[in-house]
Amino acid sequence: MTRLGRLRDEGGFSLVFTLLTVLVTSVTLTTVIQYTTSNSSAAGRSKADQIAYALAEAGLANGAATLSKPGNDALDPTTLPSSEPDSADPAQADYILEYDGGTVKFWGVLTGNQWIIHGLGIVDDPTGRTTAVRREVTSTIKIQPSLEQ
């Protein structure tokens, strides 16, 4: 075979082309898998944030329900704990509740005739990388004294 004939021979080209195709496909698949895994973790964390926020709002509702309960004096500053309830204190067990997805804590401070109520939602971190996800919300409730209290 002449020199020109050997240059025109394409017998080894398919091997090189196949190897390049496999390399590009491998890099692409690795990138897609890494991107998908990263997004899955972010989505799990985002879901935990939303659940913790919803639980914190449930804490506000529980605080308001405690104040509006007929047997409770809403103008008594000891109706709710004045700081975040401690799970080690049995006297504060009524202010720590377990719901689907996490834990709710609620407390409040009476100033004049209004309560500043705090609700806290706590959810385990789904990624397992950090501590629990905590979200706190606060609301002010004005108390209207009545003769029936």
Image (cartoon, rainbow, N blue to C red):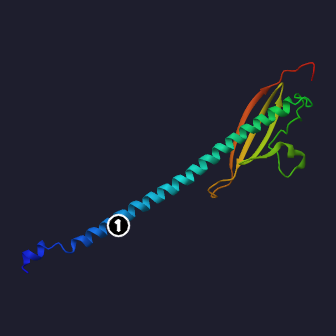
Q: Is residue 19 above or below residue 103?
A: below
Residue 66 location, x and y as percent?
A: 85, 34
| Left or right: 11 as drawn, with respect to 39 | left
Residue 142 location, x and y as percent?
A: 79, 24
Query: Please, which residue is most extreme toward the top here?
Result: 147
Q: Is residue 125 above or below residue 51?
A: below
Kindly identify the residue that appears in the image at 39 percent across and 65 percent down: 26
Kindly identify the residue that appears in the image at 48 percent across and 59 percent down: 34
Kindly identify the residue that appears in the image at 56 percent across and 51 percent down: 42
- Occupied quadrant, residue 53: top right
Q: Is residue 104 above or below residue 30?
A: above
Task: Indicate the amino acid at tag 1.
Answer: Leu
Residue 33 location, x and y as percent?
A: 47, 59
In what quadrant of the picture does the C terminus appear? top right
Say which residue label 1 marks.
Answer: 23
- Occupied quadrant, residue 62: top right
- Between 93 and 47, the one lying in front of the other is 47
Q: Secondary structure at mark 1?
A: helix
Kindly identify the residue that appears in the image at 47 percent across and 55 percent down: 35
